[in-house]
């Protein structure tokens, strides 16, 4: 199989505090989505890079977990992952993404809570986004049946 390439693009106008930007994805799923200093640091409506990273991580983990469950002979009815990207102020100024928190809940017939959690932790090792993010931050995983 050939390498898979996915593309995104962002444009920024103006300075950091008063400027604004738009982010798009080649697929069209995101098209001119607004972001700014205020959507990133002050919770105004619009998106921000950390929210997009969290959404990507939740999507990737849900797929990896579903695949791992199937590999072990289980048929998941539903896997729902909520990801929280934690950005912390740094000594000397600036911010850094320091942690990702994954909360996964699911419906998997014939599976107990302990096994669900064990398989979720195993799936984390096969999630490409988890593997990318793991190099530099902590990933906390809370997994339980719904």
Image (cartoon, rainbow, N blue to C red):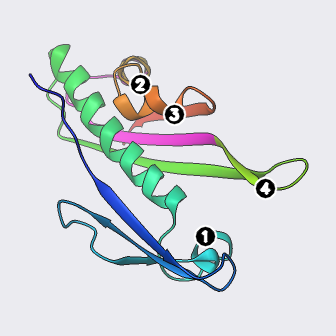
Mark 3–mark 4 distance (CA, rounded to whole Å): 19 Å
| Marker disc for residue 24 | none
Q: Nearer the viewer, mark 4 or mark 2?
A: 4
x 67%, y 52%: residue? 87
Q: Nearer the viewer, mark 3 or mark 2?
A: 3
Mark 4–mark 1 distance (CA, rounded to whole Å): 13 Å
The 10 Å Cα crowd at callout 2, few under 14, some 14 to 19, many 20 or more, is many
Mark 3–mark 1 distance (CA, rounded to whole Å): 20 Å
Q: Nearer the viewer, mark 4 or mark 1?
A: 4
117 or 40, nearer to the observer: 40
Q: Do the residues bearing badges 1 and 2 touch, measured as CB atoms within 8 Å?
A: no
Above or below, 15 relative to 140: below
The 10 Å Cα crowd at callout 4, few under 14, some 14 to 19, many 20 or more, is few
* Label 4 or label 1, whichever comes before in sequence order: 1
The residue pinned by badge 3 equals: 133
Instruction: Say what secondary structure mark 3 lies in.
Output: helix
113 or 27, nearer to the observer: 27
The residue pinned by badge 1 equals: 40
The residue pinned by badge 4 equals: 94
User: Residue 101 appears at what percent x and percent y?
Assistant: 56, 42
Mark 3–mark 2 distance (CA, rounded to whole Å): 11 Å
* Label 1 or label 2, whichever comes before in sequence order: 1
Mark 1–mark 2 distance (CA, rounded to whole Å): 27 Å
User: Residue 103 appears at what percent x and percent y?
Assistant: 48, 42
**Which range of residues does the magenta coloring cover?**
99-117
The residue pinned by badge 2 equals: 124
Instruction: Say what secondary structure mark 1 lies in.
Output: helix
């Amino acid at each position: 199989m050939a390498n898979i390439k996915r593309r995104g693009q962002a444009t920024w106008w103006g300075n950091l505090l008063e400027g604004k930007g738009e982010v798009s994805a080649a697929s069209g799923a995101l098209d001119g989505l607004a972001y700014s200093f205020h959507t990133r640091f002050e919770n105004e409506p619009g998106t921000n890079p950390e929210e997009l990273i969290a959404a990507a991580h939740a999507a990737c983990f849900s797929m990896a977990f579903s695949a791992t469950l199937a590999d072990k002979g289980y048929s998941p009815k539903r896997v729902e992952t909520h990801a929280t990207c934690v950005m912390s102020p740094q000594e000397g100024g600036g911010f850094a993404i320091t942690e990702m928190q994954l909360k996964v809940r699911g419906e998997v017939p014939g599976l107990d809570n302990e096994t669900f959690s064990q398989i979720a932790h195993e799936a984390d090792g096969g999630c490409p986004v988890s593997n990318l993010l793991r190099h530099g931050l902590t990933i906390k995983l809370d997994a339980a049946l719904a």
